[in-house]
Amino acid sequence: MNDIRVRVLDEDEWATYRDVRLRALRESPEAFVASAEEEEAFDDQRWKDRMVRSRRILAQDGDEVVGVVSVGTGHRTNIPGAGELFGLWVEPPRRGSGVARRLMEKAARVGRQVGLKQLVYWVGTDNGRAVAFASSFGFRPTDDRRPMRIRGVDDEDADSEEMMMVYPLSDTGGVPTSL
């Protein structure tokens, strides 16, 4: 775990983000609204535009990418001063090893750096492991819910939902504020 490096991708590293995003979509299709097939069809400009809209944070072990998360700067939530944490993925052999926590810590620092007051994270209500992890980090559940779109399941059969969890950034909560 000591060899894991977590960093924010530069805008010109869009191809690196594209590669890990497609890898995540292929490995864990049930965890994402988008599909690998849809996003493989995106042209280069669309990937470049995505790098401008949100910060992309990568976890690496040497040259090997082992995780990713994104921090949106408020365009996806209507809560003043809030950004959204989304697209969290850690390769299966690294799950439970602290990579996700390192990604979340960096996301919180990035959020503070860009002036956000809180992070919003939508988590499937039936994903106990994700809810427990987010709670252990300091995210708190809210009463806000939305339907969870599951790939390959008809809307009438999809009764899963996501809940909004919120993490305040005004208090560092033990997370160092320096990048």
Image: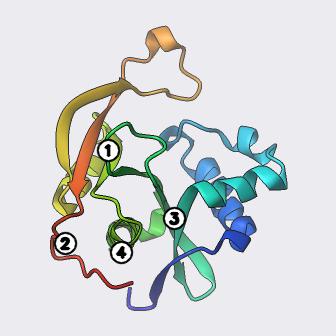
Q: Which quadrant, please, contains the N terminus?
A: bottom left
Which sits in the foreground, 115 or 54? 115
Q: Label 3's element? A: strand
- Which mark lies nearer to you, 4 or 1? 1
Residue 41 is at least partly visible in this image = yes
**What label sits on residue 102 in the rendered view?**
4
Please name the residue shown 24% across and 48% down the image: 166
Which sits in the foreground, 113 or 46? 113
**What label sits on residue 172 in the rendered view?**
2
Q: Residue furthest top?
A: 156
Which sits in the foreground, 166 or 95? 166
The image quadrant of residue 65 is bottom right
Q: Could you tell me residue 170's position as x and y percent? A: 20, 64
Q: Residues within 10 Å of mark 2 (few under 14, many from 20)?
A: few
Colouring scheme, one of rainbow, by chain, secondary structure, one colour? rainbow
Which residue is label 1 attached to? 80
Q: Amino acid at mark 3?
A: Val
Task: Indicate whether 48 appears above or below 126.
Answer: below
**What label sits on residue 136 in the rendered view?**
none
Rounded to the nearest angstrom, the CA distance separating label 3 from label 1 is 25 Å
